[in-house]
Structures are given as structure tokens and as C-alpha cells.
Amino acid sequence: MSNEIAKFNEQEMTLIEQLGYKQIPANHLKMFFARAEALGLNPQDPSQIALIERKTKNGKTYTLQVGIGGARRTARRIAKQEGGTYREGDWLYKGIDHSTGQETEWRDTWNVARMGYPEFAKVIVYRDGEPFPHVVTWDESKQTWGREGNLTPMWDAKPTFMLGKNAAAGAFRKAFPDELGDVYFDSESFVDTSEPIRQKATRQDVAQQALSAPAPKKKQEPEPEDDQFVRDVKAALAELTSAEAVTDFMNEIREESDVPQKVINLGRDRWNELQENK
């Protein structure tokens, strides 16, 4: 990006550095800032919108991701501008209740400990009274890692939340195709397809979920698992708002196992950032 620095103003350059986007090509960064402005989202807040690097068989690519809060913010803004209405329905679940062996009807609560994992999740987003339902399945949405196919920390910690979030993602894209049809939620992974509504899910959401993930052993886990753990911790640190909370968080994950130096550096940088902003 160094040859194209002149394309960005000073404020944008500062933000690019803060977000760790310095290695992203300028054309992707320009698109990111333009889309954030069009959606009415804050590019400084990764929980609203972020630009995610993905590795594919054809090399690196970059994908816009929004959080559930960012999608709701965009929907409210559009409805207000158009003089219309927007409403998000309950997150509903359905499947076999393992405690009874019976198939359930759609329900808004699901106890994984007692019932096992739900098979389906459904969310309806209403735009000007018109319903836009979307259903996702557990098998197609869950994220796993490693040879044993274990659930990733986020899906292991809050499986119904993650599944419901992906159902909501599809519903929002259907209800607001012009604005959200080309973006992915932070609970989804990018796959090369022309139908973004049918994406499989991956990613993490909140600090509480990352706390449940033991740090991978350097000599026991392959590199991709280390990378996933680092991403989990990075997302968790972004949610913390005080240096004290960062200290407690880092102490907790370091009690679990050996922590990669990169993770320690992330914690130190976030702690320093919060100290400077006091």
C-alpha cells in the first residue's frame, strides 16, 4: 500500500494503522471506507464493520464483515430515511430433544445441556410489514477445527447464539439486499459462491466466549489452530474497555496453558492503548 499512500487523508491513514490494515491493498481499503459510510457504520468499531483477510486457493481476498449490531443499525437508519418500518422477529430453534427423543416445534429457547444441539434456527426480519424468513442448519453452519472436528471456542461456548446469528444474517440480507446483500456477518466464513445468503458460519463474537478457549500448545497444535486462537483473543480484547479488564483477561487465559508470544503482545498493546485513553 506504500505506493498509494497519497490516496488517503491523514485521518484515514491513522485509522488504517490503528486497525492493522496497513498491508491491505488500497483499492480494498477505499471500498471499505466507502461501504462503511454508505451503511452508516463506524469504521473505527470492528463490532459494526470490519475488513477481513481470507486465504483462498487463488490467494488472498478481503471480505466486508458486519456485526449483528451493525446490521440492526443499518436497518433502523434505512427504515427511518424511507419512512418505513423494520422489525426483527424472535430467534427460533427446532430439532430433536435428546432428553425425550421427540422432535420439537419452533421455540425461542433451547437448553443445549439438556436437549443437545438444535438442528435448525430461523429468524424473520420484517421490512414495511413484509416478512423475510431465513433458516440455517446446524450441520452446515457449525464451525469446527482440528483433526477431531471439535467446535471452535465461540460455537462451543454459545452454540444457539451463533446458530441464531447466522439465521439472522440471511434474513437481513434478504430484507435489505441493496445495502447488506454483499456483506457477511462476523459469525460467517467466506466461501467462493454467487449466493452469499447460503454461507457457512465461522467466527467469534464476544470476549466471554474467547475466555472459554484454552490456549493451543505450540508443539501439539498445527499452525491454523494457533491462528484461530489469536483471532479469538484479538476479538475478545477489542470488547474490553479498561486496562484492569485486560489484565484480568490475560491472567485467566495464561493460567490455562502456554500462550503464544503474539497473544501476549496483543494484550500488552491493548493495555497500553486503554491506559493512554484514560
Image (cartoon, helix red, strand yellow):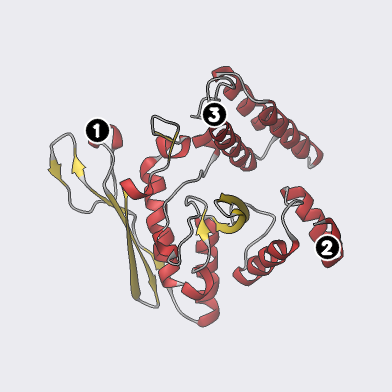
Is 3 situated above or below 104? below
Type of the residue with mark 1: Arg
Type of the residue with mark 3: Pro
The residue wearing badge 2 is 4
Residue placed at 62% from the left, 57% from the top? 62
Query: Which of the two labelled residues, at mark 3 and mark 2, occupies the earlier sequence position?
Result: 2
Residue placed at 28% from the left, 40% from the top? 117
- The quarter of the image holding the C terminus is top right
| Residue 3 picture location, percent across and down | 85, 60
The residue wearing badge 3 is 222
- Dots 3 and 1: beta carbons under 8 Å? no
| Residue 86 picture location, percent across and down | 43, 71
| Residue 277 picture location, percent across and down | 79, 42
Q: Which element carries disc 1, helix, strand or loop?
A: helix
Is 227 situated above or below 135? above
Query: Which of the two labelled residues, at mark 1 and mark 2, occupies the earlier sequence position?
Result: 2
Q: Which element carries disc 2, helix, strand or loop?
A: helix
Name the foreground residue: 263 vs 207: 263
Q: Residues within 10 Å of mark 3 (few under 14, many from 20)?
A: few
The residue wearing badge 1 is 114
Residue placed at 19% from the left, 43% from the top? 96
For the residues marked 1 and 2, what is the alpha-carbon distance in whole angstroms? 56 Å
For the residues marked 3 and 2, what is the alpha-carbon distance in whole angstroms? 36 Å
Q: Residues within 10 Å of mark 2 (few under 14, many from 20)?
A: few
| Residue 193 picture location, percent across and down | 45, 62
Q: Which element carries disc 3, helix, strand or loop?
A: loop
